[in-house]
Amino acid sequence: MKKNKRIINAKMSDSEKAKKSEKTASAGTKKSVKAGKGKASAKRKADTSPLSSIDKKLEKEAAINKSANARYAADPKYHGHSKLEMRAREIGFALLAVVIGSLGTASIMLPNGLTFGGITGIARIIQQYTNWNYSLTYYGLSLIITAIVWVFLGWKEVGKILLMSMSYPAVMLLLEVNNVVIVKSDDLFLVSVFCGVFLGISNGLTFKAGFSSGGTDSLAKVIKYRWLPHLGINDISFAINSIIVLCSAAVFGVTIALYAVIIIYVSMRVGEGVMYGLSNKIVELDIIPGDPDALTDFIMHELGRGVSSVEVTGEYTGDHRKQLKILCSPRESFIIKRHLAKNDPKSFVSVYSVRSVWGAGRGFSDIRDIDS
């Protein structure tokens, strides 16, 4: 009996031990589940944190930039588009420039008795003495300049001005016939600024599309290539426009001529903004990194940008370091900054604004399209 009792007690003890181990295992499982949930919750918090979302956004933009940079480098002229698509885009910009410029001339400048440089100013002087229709006078001058360009520079140059020379006076004539007036005011200063904005947008879009207005810039090009090759086109254009403005002062008075100077200045500044952007599209980064090879690899393979390097010496320490030079968009410079902040925070970076870059690359201008 005693033996049986000991056996029963032993069995009960084993059963209690089994129950205890089950409870311990259950508690351990609950703890591990809680720990797992805690880790998952922390991961979700990390994923939803502002820093993480910025990083993900930058990674996505870096991939897009890399693809676009590779496409622009491989095809600097058409950027992966067909020749027909690019030509249609250029013609669209040119026609938009025609409409905006025509509104600035026929609907703002003429109703307020103002004038301008170029063949616009010449047409105004002729109109003052002959009372001919302004748009038809402008049309005749455009045909004369087109003929001069064809004789001295050939048909290729005519192709750049033909669209503007034919469509510009046609749209102006349509606006004149229908008496379309945007603004007419006694405050000629504000009218001059407003007119300059219209003409500046028109000029900027024209050059951005690769066309020429067929005005004094075409005459300047003829003079440069035929008689004065040592002078720049801008210098010759400035001289021609100065003569036209001085003639306008003699015909319309000094006040109107001064307003013409305001229109010319505003149109130049606005035109530059349209051509190059109101903010810089390209920045230059000069970087002295701790690990130049790793940064070069990141920029070339993650962003798809080129890198130049030069050895520099710190005069205080005498250390020789490698300095990297990168031309990229402001957004890409931010991606590089984020990369350095994470991986190489002791890097030294200088950032410079760049007006324009001529060469093969995204955001760069094709050097073949630039008239020197």
Image (tube, grey):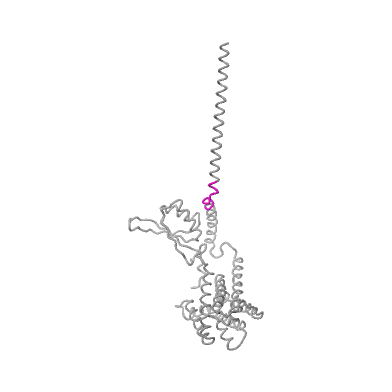
- Taking depth in this image into account, of 15 and 272 the one nearest to the observer is 15
- Taking depth in this image into account, of 20 and 110 the one nearest to the observer is 20
**Location of residue 178 in the rendering, given as x and y in whole percent from the top left corner:** 66, 79
**Location of residue 244 in the rendering, given as x and y in whole percent from the top left corner:** 52, 83
**Location of residue 296 in the rendering, given as x and y in whole percent from the top left corner:** 45, 55
- Horizontal side of 69 relative to 321 (left or right) equals right
Instruction: Return the residue found at the far front.
Output: 186
Q: Quadrant of the N terminus?
A: top right
Instruction: Return the residue found at the far bottom.
Output: 129
- Taking depth in this image into account, of 345 and 142 the one nearest to the observer is 345
Magenta-drawn segment: 45-54
Q: Main secondary structure of the magenta part?
A: helix
**Location of residue 51 in the rendering, given as x and y in whole percent from the top left corner:** 51, 51
Above or below, 145 against 45 in this view is below
Above or below, 207 against 38 in this view is below
Q: Quadrant of residue 154?
A: bottom right
Q: How many marks?
A: 0
Q: Is residue 201 magenta?
A: no
Instruction: Return the residue found at the far top.
Output: 1
Above or below, 68 against 32 in this view is below
- Horizontal side of 214 relative to 320 (left or right) equals right
Instruction: Return the residue found at the far right.
Output: 178
